[in-house]
Image (cartoon, helix red, strand yellow):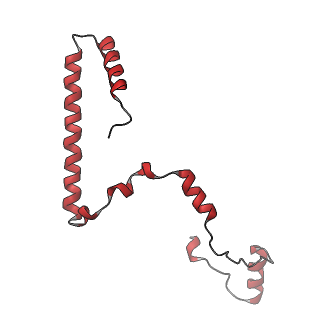
Amino acid sequence: MSFGLTFDKLLIIGIIAVFLLGPERLPYYASQLARLVKSLRVMADGAKERMREEMGPDFDDIDWKKLDPRQYDPRRIIREALTDDEPEVKVKPVTESAYAQRQRFVREGRPAPYDSEAT
C-alpha cells in the first residue's frame, strides 16, 4: 500500500519534519515511527494467521482483489442499476384504504390481514 505517496511527497514530508522536530529530536521520532510500522506489520500478520487458522483451507481460495473497495466505481454501479432490464412488477392498484379494508373485515367477521414481515 502506497497511499499515493511518491518519492517527492516523502521528501517534502521529511523536510517539514526536520524543520518541525529539529535535527536533535528527529532520530528519536524516526525510530519510534519505525517501531510503530513494525508493530503494525506484526499485528496484521497475526490477524492474517488467525484468519487462516479459523477459516481453514478456504482462506487460501479467497480472491482478495475482488473484495478491494477501491475497484468499485459508484457511477458504474448506478449506471448498471438504472439500465438493468428487469421485468416490471405488476402492482395491483389500491381501491380502498387500509382502514376501510380493516373495517370491512371486521363487518364480515374475518380477522384483519396480518403481515408477519412487518413486525
Q: Residue at x 31, y 19 (%)?
A: 14
- Viewed as shown, does residue 1 lie left or right of 118? left
In this view, the residue in front, 94 or 38, is 38
Q: Quadrant of the C terminus?
A: bottom right
Where is 91 relative to 16, above or below? below
Residue farthest front in this picture: 7
In this view, the residue in front, 7 or 78, is 7
Q: Residue at x 39, y 35 (%)?
A: 4
Residue 35, x across and y down, in percent: 19, 31
In this view, the residue in front, 41 or 92, is 41
Where is 56 relative to 107, above or below? above
Residue 39, x across and y down, in percent: 20, 37
Q: Quadrant of residue 8?
A: top left
Residue 30, x across and y down, in percent: 22, 22
Q: Quadrant of residue 97?
A: bottom right
- Viewed as shown, does residue 45 lie left or right of 68? left
Where is 46 relative to 80, above or below? above
| Number of marks in the rendered image | 0
Where is 5 relative to 94, above or below? above
Q: Residue at x 35, y 55 (%)?
A: 65
Q: Quadrant of the N terminus?
A: top left
Q: Residue at x 77, y 77 (%)?
A: 93
In this view, the residue in front, 39 or 63, is 63
Q: Quadrant of residue 102?
A: bottom right
